[in-house]
Amino acid sequence: GIQVEQSPPDLILQEGANSTLRCNFSDSVNNLQWFHQNPWGQLINLFYIPSGTKQNGRLSATTVATERYSLLYISSSQTTDSGVYFCAVEAGGSNYKLTFGKGTLLTVNP
Amino acid sequence: NAGVTQTPKFQVLKTGQSMTLQCAQDMNHEYMSWYRQDPGMGLRLIHYSVGAGITDQGEVPNGYNVSRSTTEDFPLRLLSAAPSQTSVYFCASSYHRGLSTDTQYFGPGTRLTVL
């Protein structure tokens, strides 16, 4: 099956810093989503982005499907950005089956 | 809208017991799915459904059973609980785009411990 690798596994920032999280995948995809899991365990969808670039406030994401990677940018980080960020992909031909990476644990200190 | 709801929030079972985790959504989503989350493993797909009466297996289906009699509900049944099924279980739902899922909405999770 498709492999999804996220980097870095852990990241510690001071409030106000910027960061870039990466998601590499091993095969073509027809669906890619980014999620944030807050410290209380709730999973929130950030972006549906199988290709191209999207922005939502301080967050933006870019997927380069031909090179099999996606990037999540967090600018001017806040303590509320802490948590785990997951990338999930649906491989072409694996209809309806999302495969998650192991996540990046982000800690933003005040 | 309540979104995706799950009950119970916490459950402790003994080995061999059976139980049903409930999931409901009020967004008229065709697609619903169950995941388990274990430390360091990310989320893994157990079963999914693309509409009432249609279910299929995900990555880790053994020991679990599902059915989908209505659009709103997608219960997950543990037939004979084992300690290896200790995990946090998440239900998710979405519309679908052709043969693919759309933006996923997750429930709050059920933390299950099997002794």
Image (spheres, rainbow, N blue to C red):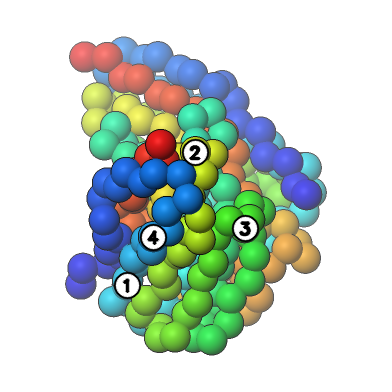
**Marks 4 and 1 share the same chain:** yes
Badge 3 marks a residue whose secondary structure is loop
- Same subunit: marks 3 and 4: yes
Asked where in the image residue A26 lies, by quadrant, the reply is: top right
Front residue (pair A7, A1): A1
Q: Is residue B10 above or below residue B61?
A: above
Please give the residue where the numbered disc 2 appears in the rendered image. B83
Identify which amino acid the numbered label 4 is placed on.
Met
Q: Is residue A49 above or below residue B74?
A: above
Output the chain of dot 1: B
Element at label 1: strand
Q: Which mark is residue B25?
A: 1
Q: Disc 4 on helix, strand or loop?
A: strand
Instruction: Give the number of the mark in front: 2 or 1.
Output: 2
Q: What's the distance in space between the residues labelled 2 and 3, CA to CA?
A: 16 Å
Q: Chain of mark 3?
A: B
Per the model, the C-alpha gap separating discs 4 and 2 is 14 Å
Residue B77 visible, this angle: yes
Discs 2, 3 touching: Cβ within 8 Å: no
- Three-letter code for the amino acid on which mark 3 is drawn: Pro
Closer to the eye: label 2 or 3? 2
Residue ID for mark 4: B19
Left or right placement of residue A80 versus residue A65 in this view? left
- Identify residue for label 3: B61
Q: Is residue B32 left or right of residue A108?
A: right
